[in-house]
Image (cartoon, rainbow, N blue to C red):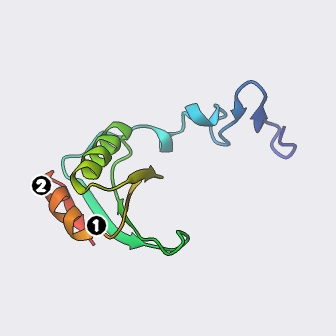
């Protein structure tokens, strides 16, 4: 128990608990974790990062709605079209290498506005 707040922070039955709602972390019920509907106009932001990756660069697609089904389907389609690896990290997609030019075309073809 967290002595200052008088509530559990870890349970042997469920593991780590969310500090906001008290549910197990993998089944958090907070509004920040809830699934958003995909808006009519999605604006994706592209950026290139290499910090903390041993000099390797990744292209980050950020600004996507918090809808796991939409994000996973988009990632699969982009990885297949680009022939590269990638993953979902905290509401953003990471694709290996500098793929910004190709991503602009692919995202625009899917109806997403692109910045960056």
Q: Residue furthest left?
A: 109
- The quarter in which the N terminus is drawn is top right
Q: Residue at x 33, y 45 (%)?
A: 71
Q: Secondary structure at mark 2?
A: helix
Where is residue 105? Give x, y as percent: 15, 62
Foreground: 91 or 56?
56
Per the rendering, the mark at residue 99 is: 1
Per the rendering, the mark at residue 32 is: none
Q: Of the residues under marks 1 and 2, which one precedes in the sequence?
A: 1
Q: Secondary structure at mark 1?
A: loop
- Which residue is labeled 2 in the image? 109
- Alpha carbon of mark 1 to alpha carbon of mark 2: how far? 15 Å
In the image, residue 113 sits, relative to residue 50, either above or below, namely above
Where is residue 54? Give x, y as percent: 54, 72
Foreground: 4 or 79?
79
Where is residue 58? Give x, y as percent: 40, 66
Residue count near mark 1 (Cα–Cα under 10 Å), binned few <14, some 14–19, many ≥20: some
In the image, residue 70 sits, relative to residue 13, either above or below, namely below
Q: Residue at x 32, y 48 (%)?
A: 75
Q: Residue at x 56, y 70 (%)?
A: 52
Q: Is residue 71 visible?
A: yes
Foreground: 32 or 95?
95
Foreground: 68 or 42?
68
Residue count near mark 2 (Cα–Cα under 10 Å), binned few <14, some 14–19, many ≥20: few
Q: Residue furthest right?
A: 3
Q: Quadrant of residue 113?
A: bottom left
Q: Residue furthest front?
A: 83
Left or right: 9 with respect to 84?
A: right
Where is residue 21? Give x, y as percent: 62, 36
Q: Is residue 91 visible?
A: no
Left or right: 55 with respect to 7?
A: left
- The quarter in which the C terminus is drawn is bottom left
């Amino acid at each position: 128990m967290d002595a200052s707040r008088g509530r559990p922070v870890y349970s042997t039955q469920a593991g780590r608990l969310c500090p906001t709602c008290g549910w197990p972390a993998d089944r958090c019920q907070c509004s920040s974790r809830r699934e958003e509907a995909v808006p009519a106009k999605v604006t994706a932001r592209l950026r290139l990062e290499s910090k903390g990756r041993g000099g390797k660069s990744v292209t980050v697609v950020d600004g996507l709605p918090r809808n796991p089904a939409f994000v996973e389907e988009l990632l699969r389609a982009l990885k297949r079209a680009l022939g590269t690896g990638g993953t979902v990290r905290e509401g953003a997609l990471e694709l290996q290498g500098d793929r910004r030019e190709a991503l602009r075309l692919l995202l625009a073809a899917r109806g997403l506005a692109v910045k960056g």
